[in-house]
Image: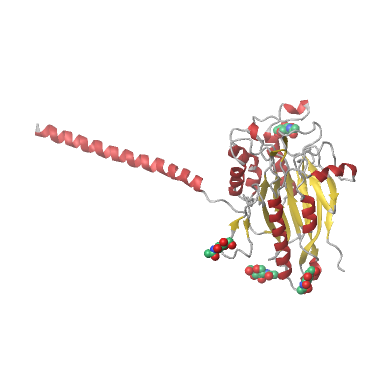
């Protein structure tokens, strides 16, 4: 009896030990994975090298990508391609085009002007975004995006989309601006303005130059909304007065601080104020007038703008710094036209799941800013050029033009 108790006790002891060993094993095998998952969720965002600045060769190149209309990936079919192309065409062709453009142009920055994803074609907006932007995440290049009218037609609201986009690797997008109003000396605050994805970015002068710590090219991003009902009628969104007021403040602040930080020499060579470029999705009403004017590129479909005109053009004219505006939305228009001294340029449809014209290649726009050469070092922006590339075998370069040049010194 005694002996068998001892044996039982010994068995139980062995049993207990083996359970402990098993638990230890389980813990060591599984918990790192749990922790790893934990880390993945709390993973720190990767940042590009900041601030954005001109290269030491005096250039800064932007790739504009309009209307990727990304869906679910390989299962998402292409629209408006030739019958012979249809069978082997999916969202992966959009991805491949973006990779090729990054390789060919080696831009310093990529601007996505909305309809990045096509909501109805994906069951998971976050996954679609990750896939759509994957080539730029691989590249490590700084990038920014605004929303179009289709991005939110899936599982995320516009606010959630912009927040998610602002947290993606290498993204310098912002959900909304943190105002730097000097009257609010006790800290910054989120401006109470319409939409999601209104923000400005500064591009600094070439390394080692007198303007290395100054913003010499400003990039404005605006949310042009999705759809609205006005007087019982459906129309597209527009840039609201609150957004324009915010932008005027930003522009004024940038121009004032520019003068304050300059000595006489620099003031002379840089001219009036640093030029700015604006990016948003839906064209403004005045773009319609360009049908009757000289343009560079093609005008092949009606301008799908809002029925409301909130005075974007007049605001830009009064600000004085915006030299060119880059829009999307109408995939079969890829032209640049001038309205009151400001260029309005379509990116041209980029994505294969977006409507387009069969046999008219998908395309992307490139914007190049060049600096003025001083006696010893680079100065401010001298010239802004643009061209497009087609997604054909050669990535054909077309429609190169100068958008702006610094006025000669008086
Ligand atoms: C889409 O990609 C596939 C695979 O690379 C290629 O064979 C096909 O030609 C592409 N289609 C178009 C329209 O570019
Ligand atoms: C901070 O700024 C806000 C807005 O100007 C003002 O209303 C508030 O009184 C300030 N708070 C302090 C502690 O200064
Ligand atoms: C720019 O800032 C850096 C770091 O603060 C400084 O070393 C450099 O001298 C500054 N350059 C100019 C032109 O102000
Ligand atoms: C720089 O230029 C601006 C605008 O022309 C002028 O108002 C300002 O007085 C100039 N500053 C200097 C230091 O020359």
Q: Which residue in the rendered view is the most extreme toward the bottom? A: 264
Classify residue 74 by image quadrant: top right
Between residue 374 and residue 129, name the one nearer to us.
Answer: 129
Q: Is residue 360 left or right of residue 95?
A: right
Query: In the image, is residue 299 above or below residue 381?
Result: above
Instruction: Name the quadrant where ligand 1 sits.
Output: top right
Classify residue 251 by image quadrant: bottom right
Query: In the image, is residue 69 above or below residue 239?
Result: above
Between residue 38 and residue 192, name the one nearer to us.
Answer: 192
Query: In the image, is residue 169 above or below residue 16?
Result: below
Query: In the image, is residue 121 above or below residue 259?
Result: above
Image quarter hosting the N terminus:
top left
Which residue: 68% across, 34% down? 91
Classify residue 116 by image quadrant: top right
Image quarter hosting the C terminus:
bottom right
Residue 274 placement (x, y as % from top left): 76, 62
Q: Is residue 290 left or right of residue 310?
A: right
Residue 166 placement (x, y as % from top left): 61, 49
Total labels: the figure holds: 0
Q: Which residue in the rendered view is the most extreme toward the left? A: 1
Q: Is residue 253 visible?
A: yes
Between residue 287 and residue 48, name the one nearer to us.
Answer: 287
Residue 394 placement (x, y as % from top left): 80, 41
Residue 69 placement (x, y as % from top left): 69, 37
Which residue: 86% across, 67% down? 409
Between residue 96 and residue 249, name the one nearer to us.
Answer: 249
Q: Is residue 73 visible?
A: no
Q: How is the image coloured?
A: secondary structure
């Amino acid at each position: 009896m005694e002996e068998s108790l001892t044996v039982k006790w010994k068995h139980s002891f062995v049993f207990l030990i083996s359970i402990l060993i098993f638990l230890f094993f389980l813990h060591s095998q599984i918990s790192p994975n749990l922790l790893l998952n934990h880390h993945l969720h709390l993973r720190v965002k990767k940042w590009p090298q900041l601030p954005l600045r001109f290269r030491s060769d005096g250039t800064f190149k932007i790739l504009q990508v309009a209307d990727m209309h990304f869906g679910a990936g390989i299962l998402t079919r292409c629209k408006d391609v030739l019958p012979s192309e249809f069978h082997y065409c999916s969202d992966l062709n959009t991805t491949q085009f973006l990779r090729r453009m990054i390789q060919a142009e080696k831009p310093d920055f990529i601007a996505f002007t909305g309809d990045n994803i096509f909501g109805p074609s994906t069951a998971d907006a976050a996954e679609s975004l990750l896939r759509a932007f994957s080539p730029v995440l691989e590249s490590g290049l700084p990038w920014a995006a605004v929303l179009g009218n289709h991005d939110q037609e899936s599982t995320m609201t516009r606010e959630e989309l912009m927040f998610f986009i602002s947290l993606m690797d290498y993204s310098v997008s912002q959900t909304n601006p943190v105002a730097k109003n000097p009257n609010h000396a006790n800290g910054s605050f989120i401006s109470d303005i319409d939409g999601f994805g209104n923000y400005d970015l500064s591009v600094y002068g070439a390394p080692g130059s007198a303007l290395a710590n100054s913003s010499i090219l400003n990039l404005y991003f605006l949310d042009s909304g999705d759809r609205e009902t006005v007087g019982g009628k459906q129309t597209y969104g527009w840039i609201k007065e609150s957004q324009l007021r915010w932008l005027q403040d930003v522009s004024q602040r940038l121009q004032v601080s520019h003068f304050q930080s300059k000595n006489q020499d620099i003031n002379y060579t840089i001219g009036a104020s640093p030029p700015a470029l604006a990016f948003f999705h839906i064209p403004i009403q005045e773009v319609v007038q360009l049908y009757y004017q000289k343009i560079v590129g093609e005008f092949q479909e009606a301008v799908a703008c809002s029925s409301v005109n909130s005075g974007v053009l007049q605001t830009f004219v009064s600000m004085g710094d915006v030299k060119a505006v880059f829009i999307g939305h109408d995939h079969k228009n890829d032209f640049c036209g001038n309205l009151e001294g400001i260029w309005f340029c379509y990116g041209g449809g980029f994505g294969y799941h977006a409507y387009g014209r069969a046999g008219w290649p998908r395309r992307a726009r490139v914007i190049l800013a060049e600096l003025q050469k001083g006696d010893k070092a680079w100065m401010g922006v001298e010239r802004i050029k643009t061209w497009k590339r087609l997604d054909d075998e050669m990535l054909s370069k077309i429609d190169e033009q100068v958008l702006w040049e610094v006025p000669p010194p008086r």
